[in-house]
């Protein structure tokens, strides 16, 4: 029943102190093989039951088990003991066991109460022994009680009491090598953020351990290094880590050493530390031995059985951890040790290829390619060929290469190639969520929305936190008009990505489709809080307020959209129309003139400018504008109509000329319509129909007189 660890977890990126445990045990309480509690102080042999020794009473106990005699048992010599002492001693042992059991079930308060009660009973027991005059104190039992009590104080975050109890054991001369408990005291000081004392007590504990306990010494030094890292004293951490790499190299310490050199910016020592990192032996059996043979079924059966073995899984996890540390270290130091990330990765890849971790070079190649794509500094042909080479390799990088190729071809709109490589990735790993999302995308662009939905759902079954799968599933459901299902997807996604403007905009659009404009406005307001200058969102808000009849709010958001992006023709049209209807002709003219600059071939904007001049009473400017329009669009009937009317109102002689031109234009239009109608009737076998009126009989009232050409 573990009650305390002789280490701490350092909350840094990749830096983690390993538990200070060895074949000697750890500092926790547990039970003996026969079910009775024992104290897992560091000892050479397991505590045995019923062993009688002269050291049991009134002598001493060696916490590291370095004495020549066997470590004494927690059991007592029951010969000639009074019944009261025997019963009380058993009660103390039972209370220790109950305390440990309570800790193992998470009931820390009960564990502490039982530990305190065992302490009180142990003191009563000691008094009884002294009063009897013939029984010495059971030192092992006393040590067990105190150590368990200290552990339970620490578990309940009663650090002062825990330190005092540990100190009792450390200062008691009967407990040989009790100074090792300073490791636990150092852990407490670290939790209390008293880093100076933590280092001091780790050093004091280190001084009490002989070189025979090499593994434990290395663990304590690892903790010392982590405290130095935590307070930013990297030179002290480097000293400890370098000593560990010299005495007992391991992959975690090597990685931490790379991080320390990175922190102080020493590129040359980074290179050396990286070389040492990839030189650390893992002690793993050759993985080629586990490759099945085509002609040996019995060997294949043995190999399959071995793959299920716990040791094999442990080796695989260790190999994966080493792989992760090497890739992370290379990515970290690459841009620092050379002039660019690509050059630094090349240096790392050259070293890794010639090491026992050669497969990691493929991952670094993928990293290099992705970095070049992000920076848009790449030769597409070279990137594609490199990825195709990696796809052909039978390694873990094959899936990543195929997935990236599929994404590249997808972005190039070469959907057939994208589908081909997504299928290749699917064949390699049909449960990979990224692969499934890519496959769904290839179906989405073919408008096979139901198929795409199935792939996105499968990706979510593999990884429920895949935001890409959830977003795309929402889009597919929206395309299938499954609006409620789509809304559910985006609400779930919003719970994951709380401040994602795209997700909020999709929610607003869905509520608009569900005819709930108030909710749509609410979500758009949240989008605006994140992207206050997005012209599309501002225009959409204006549109929704317009539909709701709230014209002041609609005007505000349309105008904000225009201010952020003054070239949106729809926004300009709405603003110009609004000002025209409300007789703010000067402002309307500004917007219609801008629209005519954006769409110079659309005569309606220039007619509206002229109409604004006429409505505001500026007939001369209106006449000049109509003349200009007639010059550019000589067959526009509406323009000629207003020229004739203005000339008549202003008693200008040129009105007759415009009247004649108007009649000619109308006649030409009728002729074209008659010819068009005749052609259609002849093709359909219908008789021709003549005109009802001649062009010269056309009067102004016969024309379609639209005083305003406002956009719909």
Image: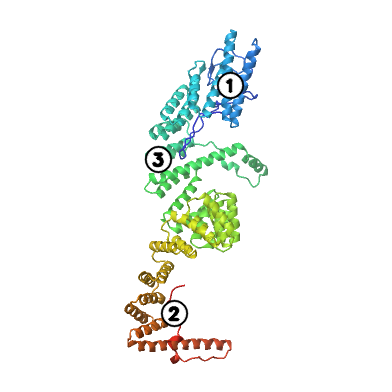
Structural crowding at the residue carrying mark 3, measured as other residues with C-alpha within 10 Å and reported as few (<14), some (14–19) or many (≥20): many
Q: Position of residue 240 (x, y in %)?
A: 42, 31
Residue 692 pos. (x, y %): 50, 91
Q: CA distance from mark 3 to mark 2?
A: 76 Å
Which badge, 3 or 2, is on the more N-terminal residue?
Answer: 3
Which label belongs to residue 117? 1
Of the numbered discs in the image, which one, if any, rests on residue 702?
Answer: none
Task: Tell me the mark number nearer the camera, choosing from 1 and 3.
Answer: 1
Residue 69 shows up from this direction: no
Does residue 86 appear to the left or right of 236 in the view shown? right
Q: Secondary structure at mark 1?
A: helix
In the shown orientation, is residue 235 left or right of residue 155? left
Q: Which residue is mark 2?
A: 706
Is the Cβ of the residue at disc 3 closer than 8 Å to that at disc 2?
Answer: no
Q: Is residue 679 above or below residue 560?
A: below
Q: Does 79 sit above or below residue 644? A: above
Residue reaching furthest to the right: 298
Mark 2 is surrounded, within 10 Å at the Cα level, by few (under 14), some (14 to 19) or many (20 or more) other residues, namely few
The x and y percentages for residue 484 are 58, 58
* Marked residue nearer the N-terminal end (1 or 2): 1
Q: Earlier in the sequence, mark 1 or mark 3?
A: 1
Pick out the residue farthest to the top.
Answer: 133
Q: Which mark is residue 262?
A: 3
Q: Is residue 543 visible?
A: yes
Expressed as whole percent of the image width and height from the top left, the position of residue 395 reads 54, 48
Distance of label 1 from label 3 (alpha carbons)? 52 Å
Q: Nearer the viewer, mark 1 or mark 2?
A: 2
Viewer-nearest residue: 284 or 676: 676
Front position among marks 3 and 2:
2
Q: Residues within 10 Å of mark 1 (few under 14, many from 20)?
A: some
């Amino acid at each position: 029943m573990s009650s305390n660890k002789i280490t701490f977890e350092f909350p840094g990126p990749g830096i983690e102190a390993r538990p200070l445990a060895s074949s000697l045990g750890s500092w926790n309480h547990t039970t003996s093989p026969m079910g009775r509690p024992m104290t897992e102080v560091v000892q050479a042999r397991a505590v045995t039951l019923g062993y009688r020794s002269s050291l049991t009473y009134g002598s001493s106990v060696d916490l590291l088990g370095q004495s020549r005699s066997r470590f004494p048992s927690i059991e007592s010599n029951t010969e000639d003991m009074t019944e009261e002492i025997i019963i009380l001693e058993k009660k103390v042992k039972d209370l220790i066991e109950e305390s440990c059991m309570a800790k193992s079930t998470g009931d820390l308060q009960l564990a502490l109460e039982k530990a305190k009660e065992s302490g009180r009973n142990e003191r009563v027991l000691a008094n009884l022994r002294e009063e009897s005059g013939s029984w010495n104190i059971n030192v092992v039992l006393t040590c067990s009680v105190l150590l368990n009590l200290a552990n339970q104080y620490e578990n309940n975050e009663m650090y002062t009491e825990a330190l005092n109890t540990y100190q009792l054991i450390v200062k008691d001369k009967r407990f040989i090598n009790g100074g090792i408990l300073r490791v636990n005291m150092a852990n407490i000081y670290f939790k209390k953020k008293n880093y100076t004392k933590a280092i001091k007590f780790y050093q004091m504990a280190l001084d009490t351990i002989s070189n025979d306990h090499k593994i434990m010494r290395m663990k304590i030094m690892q903790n010392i290094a982590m405290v130095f890292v935590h307070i930013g004293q990297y030179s002290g951490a480097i000293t400890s880590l370098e000593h560990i790499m010299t005495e007992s190299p391991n992959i975690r310490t090597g990685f931490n050493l790379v991080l320390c050199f990175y922190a102080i910016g020493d590129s040359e020592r980074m290179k050396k530390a990286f070389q040492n990192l990839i030189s650390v032996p893992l002690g793993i059996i050759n993985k080629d031995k586990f490759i099945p043979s085509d002609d040996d079924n019995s060997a294949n059966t043995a190999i399959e059985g071995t793959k299920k073995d716990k040791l094999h899984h442990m080796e695989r996890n260790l190999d994966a951890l080493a792989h992760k540390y090497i890739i992370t270290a290379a990515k970290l130091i690459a841009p620092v040790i050379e002039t660019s990330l690509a050059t630094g990765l090349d240096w790392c890849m050259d070293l890794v290829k010639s090491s026992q971790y050669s497969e990691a070079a493929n991952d670094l190649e993928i990293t290099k390619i992705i970095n070049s794509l992000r920076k848009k500094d790449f030769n597409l042909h070279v990137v594609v060929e490199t990825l195709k080479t990696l796809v052909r390799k039978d390694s873990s990088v094959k899936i990543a290469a195929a997935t990236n190729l599929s994404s590249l071809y997808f972005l190039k709109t070469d959907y057939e190639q994208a589908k081909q490589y997504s299928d290749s990735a699917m064949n390699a790993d049909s449960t990979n969520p990224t692969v499934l999302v890519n496959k769904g995308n290839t179906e989405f662009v073919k408008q096979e929305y139901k198929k795409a939905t199935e792939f996105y759902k499968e990706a979510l079954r593999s990884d429920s936190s895949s935001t890409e799968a959830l977003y795309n599933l929402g889009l597919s459901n929206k395309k299938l008009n499954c609006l409620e299902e789509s809304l559910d997807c985006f609400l779930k996604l919003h719970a994951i990505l709380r401040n994602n403007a795209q997700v909020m905009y999709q929610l607003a659009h869905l509520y608009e489709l569900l005819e709930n404009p108030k909710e749509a406005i609410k979500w758009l307001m949240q989008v605006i809080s994140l992207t206050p200058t997005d012209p599309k969102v501002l225009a959409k808000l204006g549109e929704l307020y317009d539909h709701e009849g709230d014209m002041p709010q609609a005007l505000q958001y349309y105008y904000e959209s225009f201010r952020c992006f003054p070239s949106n023709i729809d926004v300009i049209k709405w603003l110009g129309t609004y000002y025209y209807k409300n007789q703010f002709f000067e402002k309307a003219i500004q917007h219609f003139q801008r629209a005519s600059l954006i769409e110079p071939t659309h005569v309606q904007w220039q007619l509206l400018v002229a109409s604004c001049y006429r409505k505001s009473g500026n007939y001369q400017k209106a006449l000049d504008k109509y003349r200009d329009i007639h010059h550019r669009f000589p067959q526009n009937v509406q323009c000629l109509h207003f020229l004739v009317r203005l000339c008549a109102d202003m008693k200008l002689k040129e009105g007759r000329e415009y009247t004649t031109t108007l009649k000619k234009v109308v006649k030409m239009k009728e002729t074209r319509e008659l010819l068009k109608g005749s052609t259609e009737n002849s093709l359909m076998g219908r008789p021709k129909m003549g005109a009802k009126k001649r062009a010269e009989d056309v009067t102004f009232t016969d024309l379609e007189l639209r005083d305003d050409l406002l956009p719909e």
